[in-house]
Image (spheres, helix red, strand yellow):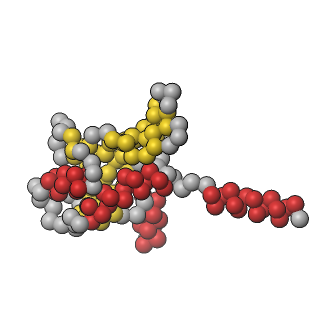
Amino acid sequence: MRLLALLVCVLLVAGCAPRLSPPYRDYEVRMAADDSLSMELREALTDSGWTVEEKSSPGIVSTQTQEIASGLLSTTYAALDLVPLSGDFVRVYVRAESRNVLGGRTKVYALNGRLREAVYGPLSESLRQRGLVPLGTPRDRDEDATDED
């Protein structure tokens, strides 16, 4: 009986564990890849509530840091970098950090569901309208690639 109760507790805890994902996501470019890709990325960011920041790196579209989530004792801020990769893909990097009420800062190395939705929810829709389709997680793509062989 104790073993069954322990098993039920373990399953409940495992089901409630947060699902973390890497702080980036890839999008496939399904539009004519020309000089307008950078402009499309800028418009998508603006439409989804981000402020584009002028950087010196050519081809990379970056945003200013803004608040994406807040809690009782901490607030999470993020900035985005959209990097075209070989003309066929765009990788969105999330540079996030959590700041607590005492002034401490912690880099966010993985996104939980709430942070993922705060960043990618509006952005993915805006990118989709411009011909960029979100791909699965890197692990999903790796598994798909090995299944085909």
Taking the image as drawn, is residue 84 in sight?
Answer: no
Vertical comparison of 8 with 72: above or below? below
* Residue 134 position in % (x across, y down): 33, 63
Taking the image as drawn, is residue 111 in sight?
Answer: yes
> Residue 2 appears in which quarter of the rendering?
bottom right
* Residue 101 position in % (x across, y down): 50, 31
Quadrant of the drawing holding the C terminus: bottom left
Vertical comparison of 23 with 29: above or below? above
> Residue 43 appears in which quarter of the rendering?
bottom left
Q: Nearer the viewer, residue 70 or 115?
A: 70
Q: Is residue 25 left or right of residue 52?
A: right
Rendered residue at 31%/57% (across/down): 123
* Residue 95 position in % (x across, y down): 37, 41
* Count of marks overlaid on the render: 0
Vertical comparison of 81 with 29: above or below? above
Rendered residue at 12%/57% (across/down): 36
Residue at far right of view: 1
